[in-house]
Amino acid sequence: MSKAVLTISSKNYGAWALRGWLMAKFAGLDFTEKVIPPDDPAMKAEILLLSSSMLVPSLQHNGIKVWDTLAIGEYLHEIKPKAGLLPDAIKARAHCRAVCGEMHSGFASLRSALPMNLKARFPGFKVWSRAQT
């Protein structure tokens, strides 16, 4: 197998990029990470070659090009079934896919209102006690 290339945007600000990266890591895929700055207009042509939607992440592996986080997760499950990305039981796997699909296609307002920024600090912000355990 050839080494995969996972093209992503910022893992700090790009929740979808981070999801693709985490899945590839959890699956144990040997990959090279290629980061495309999300705010660089010169990179638009390169992104278009990877994905007709012009979105990342995009995975290239053994002559196969897969874009979209859910599709990458499904592909990784097929090539690394022992990694446990999806449950073994059909019923549990169906439920997992439904929940992932809902998050993937829904909650746009929530994602807009609460963008990801792993470097941000909020002094004095009270974290709910049950979220700390």
Image: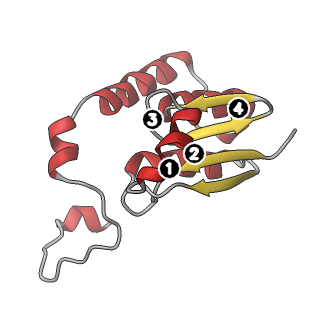
Q: Residues within 10 Å of mark 2 (few under 14, many from 20)?
A: some
Amino acid type shown at disc 2: Met
- Kindly check if marks 2 and 1 are in contact, taking CB atoms under 8 A apart as contact: no
Instruction: Name the residue tied to disc 3.
Output: 54
Residue 131 point in image, percent of width and height? 25, 62
Amino acid type shown at disc 4: Pro
Q: Earlier in the sequence, mark 3 or mark 4?
A: 3
Q: Residues within 10 Å of mark 1 (few under 14, many from 20)?
A: few
Residue at horizontal 39 percent and vertical 30 percent from the top: 100
Amino acid type shown at disc 3: Met
Name the foreground residue: 5 vs 108.
Answer: 5
| Helix, strand or loop for disc 2 | helix
| Helix, strand or loop for disc 4 | helix
Place residue 35 in its image quadrant.
bottom right
Q: Which numbered disc covers residue 72?
A: none
Q: Which numbered disc covers residue 81?
A: 4
Tell me the CA gap for discs 2 and 3: 20 Å
Instruction: Name the residue tied to disc 2.
Output: 23
Residue at horizontal 27 percent and vertical 73 percent from the top: 120
Instruction: Name the residue tied to disc 1.
Output: 43
Amino acid type shown at disc 1: Met
Name the foreground residue: 88 vs 75.
Answer: 75
